[in-house]
Amino acid sequence: MSDIDPVTGVTEVRTTYDPVTATTTEVRREVRSGGGRVGWWLAAMVAVVAILAGAYLLHERAAPPAADPGVAAATAQGSAEQAAADAQNAAATAQANAQASMQSTQAAIQQSAQTAVQSDAARAAADRAAAESAATRAAANADRANRPPADASPDNGPPEQ
């Protein structure tokens, strides 16, 4: 038998002998072990209550809250107001970006035109310098062509050897 098995009505007999009086005494005692079934019934009831509480908590957590029409309307109105505010902010941002882009484009066009004018002026100055240089060279060539050579001597015949 084990400690878990309830044993009812076990009788314990103890015999003692007294050598002085030469008598034997016998003591009988009934022993109960296991404590009965009350503990098991109590543990079963606690387990059932724990299972019911767990099922209730899981059911309440999974169930959606009851919809209140006032709360739903207020939520929808708040969402609509937020969407309108977001749209206004987006429009203001787009307008500011468009204006900045237009100013940037105008500045780029102005810079490009100024660069083109400076480039044309530089090209005209280079062309004028090249034309003046060519004219100076042409005048020098014409002057050399009209002048007799300085070391020219009359041709008297074949050169001497």
Image (tube, grey):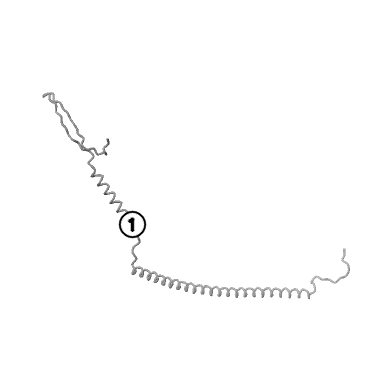
The relative height of residue 16 versus residue 62 in the rendered view (above or below) is above
Numbered disc 1: secondary structure:
helix
Q: Identify which amino acid the numbered label 1 is placed on.
A: His
Name the side, left or right, on which 4 lies relative to 85.
left
- Reading the image, the residue beneath label 1 is 59
Residue shown at the point (64%, 73%) measured from the top left: 123
Residue shown at the point (35%, 60%) measured from the top left: 63
Q: Quadrant of residue 110?
A: bottom right
Q: Quadrant of residue 153?
A: bottom right
The relative height of residue 3 versus residue 101 in the rendered view (above or below) is above
Name the side, left or right, on which 88 lies relative to 20.
right
Where is residue 128 shown, x and y percent of the image?
66, 75
Residue shown at the point (32%, 54%) measured from the top left: 55
The relative height of residue 82 versus residue 33 in the rendered view (above or below) is below
Name the side, left or right, on which 58 lies relative to 154.
left
Where is residue 105 shown, x and y percent of the image?
53, 73
Where is residue 159 shown, x and y percent of the image?
87, 66
